[in-house]
Image (cartoon, rainbow, N blue to C red):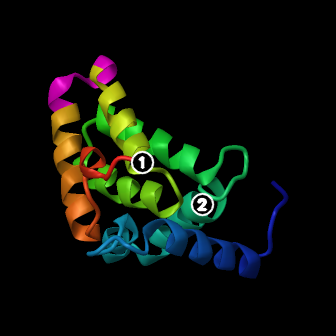
Amino acid sequence: MALMDDADLKARTKRTSHTLFHTLKGGSGFETWKRFDKALARELSLFFTGVLYSREVLSQPQRELCAVAALTALHRPNEVRAHIHAALNVGATRQEVAEVIFQMVTYGGMPVVVDALEVYGQVLAERGEPFPAEEPAR
């Protein structure tokens, strides 16, 4: 990726952040980071959201499904919540999100899968969306 001027990077950061996390109630990690160090929070946001999350090597749904999988296996429920929202916001299906969580039983064990599914259920309730198995048959 070519280097961007500061205005382009700020705009890309804001656009990507909105696309991914606009449905996340209570804010993202950025809100917590700012309470401790505003300048560092800005730099982290510019890098993660403006550079890393906006790369075009993977599609946004692929990137977010990877994040959900990794965060499930690492047992990071707060972060998995944010990235489940992001995955759904960029077009991953409810079935795909459930499947990547289920696949993590091999790497993280059943307890992390159960916890991630509980978080996923909370996200679906927040969004007013049905569980994948409750969707009408096509």
- Which residue is under mark 1? 138
Q: How far from the left and from the top, in percent, is residue 7?
A: 73, 82
Q: Nearer the viewer, residue 46 or 13?
A: 13
- Which residue is under mark 2? 47
- Name the image quarter holding the N terminus: bottom right
Task: Find numbered disc 1 in the image and state the secondary structure of the residue it sits on.
Answer: loop
Q: How far from the left and from the top, in percent, is residue 123?
A: 25, 60
Number of other residues with Cα within 10 Å of mark 1, as a class: few under 14, some 14 to 19, many 20 or more: few
Residue at the extreme top of the image, as rendered: 106
Q: Tag 2: residue type?
A: Phe
Our reading of the magenta stretch's main secondary structure is helix
Image vertical order of residue 2 relative to residue 137, above or below: below
Residue 109 located within the stretch drawn in magenta: yes
Write down the region rendered in magenta.
106-112
Number of other residues with Cα within 10 Å of mark 2, as a class: few under 14, some 14 to 19, many 20 or more: some
Give the residue at x 29% y 55%: 81
Q: Is residue 137 left or right of residue 54?
A: left
Give the residue at x 85% y 58%: 2
Task: Find numbered disc 2 in the image and state the secondary structure of the residue it sits on.
Answer: helix
